[in-house]
Image: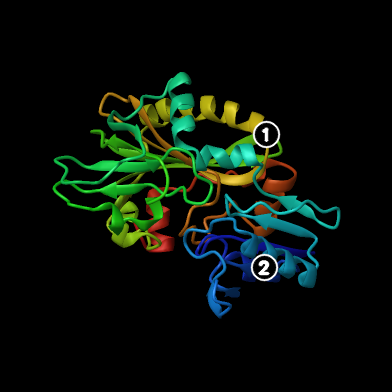
Amino acid sequence: MRILLIGLPTTFDYLVPMFSDEGHIAKLITGDEETTLTSDEGLEYQVPVCGYLPRGTSEEVNYVTGVIDSFEPDIVVNGITNLFLPTSSAYIYVGNTVESAQLETHKWATRVKAGTLGWLLPPLAEASTTSWTASTNTATTYLKPIDNFTCAATLKILPNTDAERDLVPHVENYDCFVELSVDHAVEAWCTFTMCDGEYSIVRTLGCTGAGNDKLLANLGNSWTTGITLVDLTSDQRTAFLTKCEAWLDYAKTLGGSYEGTIGGAITDTNEVYWFEQNSRPGMQNIGMLPSTATNWLNGLTTDSSLSVNQISAETIRTEKGFG
């Protein structure tokens, strides 16, 4: 079987040799490959196809469809949220619908929906606005786009930081809202696989010391630096999963086949706050698979339960070298 993997760097890198060992031919494109663009003056120049913040442009789509035409895959796994490819009967396609992608890219609507499903919501520092500037703050805040397919990144702004808008070019031209940080005992992640309207929860993990990946200086860098992974307690996991399942029961109605992550926070009294959904695999996946690459693929195409793999914090520290 010929498998084309499309993802941000460090999401699918480990899969290519695994598929080879299991008798398949896999090709990976990450967006670091360069494509030729032409300036308004007619000059040609090279740029990364997607980079850390792919924008779903026609140049990106054309590049990927060109790779598909030359590679002739049996399956295409698109792990980039806002890259929408034309349909084809020539291969099985795994990826988001426009609606499922919006769970990541349209953060205001997902925040509102999460509130209706029982999640607590971080308080707003400012309402949605077109005139936002990150002036000196006395508290940690998170800047989030209201609805933007081309740039869905959240930006963390530290206390007493004077960050002018021209230093934040990727949020320069769209509306955003600002959330305050919330006190919590542990940040919690729920990794899931969505397979054509059905989902399975792959694993849950907790951590402390996270969030530096969302600093402007660290965009695209590893989130594994400076965090401590922990296993959720039984009470924490029960409280968190109750909210995650309510969310995923809604998310599955929007279609798509993809690996995603729900982020939130759990307080000392086991109240659960909503942070975000990513409709794509997390960066620095580092091979945390259920068993085989084939099972991972079948989890996305036939049976999401094949993806389940509750791995402990200690196992990640020992085998993966971080946390």
Give the image location of residue 19, x and y in percent: 68, 66
Viewer can see residue 210: no
Left or right of residue 322: residue 3: right
Q: Label 2, secondary structure: give it.
A: helix
Q: Amino acid at mark 1?
A: Glu
Give the image location of residue 231, x and y in percent: 37, 42
Above or below, comparing residue 48 to residue 169 in the picture: below
Tell me the crowding category of disc 1: few under 14, some 14 to 19, or many 20 or more residues within 10 angstroms, Cα based: many
Residue under numbered circle 2:
63
Above or below, comparing residue 70 to residue 12 in the picture: below
Q: Residue at x 48, y 48 (%)?
A: 311
Q: Label 1, secondary structure: give it.
A: strand
Tell me the crowding category of disc 2: few under 14, some 14 to 19, or many 20 or more residues within 10 angstroms, Cα based: some
Give the image location of residue 205, x and y in percent: 41, 43
Q: Quadrant of residue 91?
A: bottom right
Q: Amino acid at mark 2?
A: Tyr
Residue under numbered circle 1:
198
Above or below, comparing residue 126 to residue 77 in the picture: above
Q: Residue at x 36, y 57 (%)?
A: 169
Which of marks 1 and 2 precedes in the sequence?
A: 2
